[in-house]
Amino acid sequence: MVAALEREVWPLIRRWRVADREYGGKNIRFFEAEGSVVVCGGIGGEAARRATEAVIALYHPSMILSVGFAGALNGSLRVGDVLEARYVVDARDGSRTDTGSGAGVLVSSPSVAGAEQKAKLGKSYGAQAVDMESAAVARGAEARGVRFGAIKVISDESGFPMPPMDRFVSADGSFRSGSFVLYAAGRPWVWPTIFRLTRNTARAAEKLCARLAGENVFSVSAKVS
């Protein structure tokens, strides 16, 4: 499974084995359980691509899942709702991946989508949710002949006033938490939005991990090389 950040899947992986392994000249942290592995590669398509390449090269999985948070593109989805997408669309070029199971459309955007951008993406692609990584994971899996799926949980609803998160994402896909705290500290009017987002993401992580564990998505094999 490929996620962006550990907090998206922490309720699931907090008791899993930690393995720090080298790939492509970089140290990458993996979380291992019997027959399964999770890598939290960072935010955005490039980070997801690197993580996908690493986990396939080192573990040889029979299936790759893109998991984590997504934003709702219409009012039908609420915080904590889980979407197993049938189609994943890359907003950069319109390419589409059929996962072969699930329902609905998930679109991957190169940037964090606010309310206005969500409305445009939903209309343009007939999608129900947006993330930043699934299309890159899908492309990496397809290039290496590995089955792909996407299971996402709604962490922000369609009209949610998302703070300007893009400016705090580093080139390697990490989130610059310290800089974000400094930004928020001088803007008390954004505190209610941030508190709400924090609460929503915690709830979303619990819902996603309950779904992943409950549906036994770990029936895929993962062999360490």
Image (spheres, grey):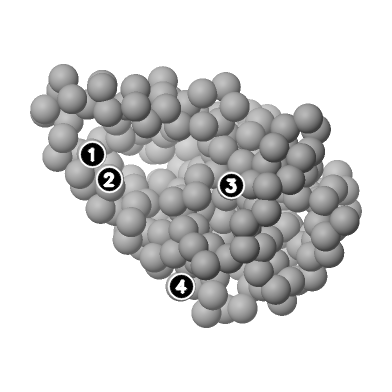
Residue located beneath label 3 in the image: 40
Image x and y of residue 80, in percent? 36, 62
Please state which of residues 22 and 169 is positioned toward the viewer in this rendering. Answer: 22
| Quadrant, the N terminus | bottom right
Residue type at the position of mark 1:
Ile
Please state which of residues 153 and 59 is positioned toward the viewer in this rendering. Answer: 59
Q: In the rendered structure, which disc, 3 or 1, sits on the residue that comes first in sequence?
A: 3
Residue located beneath label 2 in the image: 197
Mark 3 → mark 1, Cα distance in angstroms:
23 Å
Q: Are marks 2 and 1 in contact (CB under 8 Å)?
A: yes
Callout 3: SS: strand
Residue 111 visible (yes or no):
yes
Residue located beneath label 4 in the image: 210
Looking at the image, residue 128 sits to the left or right of residue 115; the answer is right
| Quadrant, the C terminus | bottom right
Residue type at the position of mark 4:
Ala
Count neighbours of disc 3 (C-alpha within 10 A) and say few if under 14, some if 14 to 19, many if 20 or more. Answer: many
Residue type at the position of mark 3:
Cys
Q: In the rendered structure, which disc, 2 or 4, sits on the residue that comes first in sequence?
A: 2
Q: In the rendered structure, which disc, 3 or 4, sits on the residue that comes first in sequence?
A: 3
Residue located beneath label 1 in the image: 194
Please state which of residues 82 and 201 is positioned toward the viewer in this rendering. Answer: 201
Choose mark 3 or mark 2, whichever is in front: 3
Image x and y of residue 154, in percent? 40, 55
Image x and y of residue 12, in percent? 50, 66
Choose mark 3 or mark 4, whichever is in front: 3
Image: 115 above or below 134: above
Mark 2 → mark 1, Cα distance in angstroms:
5 Å
Q: Quadrant of residue 161?
A: top left
Q: In the rendered structure, which disc, 3 or 2, sits on the residue that comes first in sequence?
A: 3
Mark 3 → mark 4, Cα distance in angstroms:
18 Å
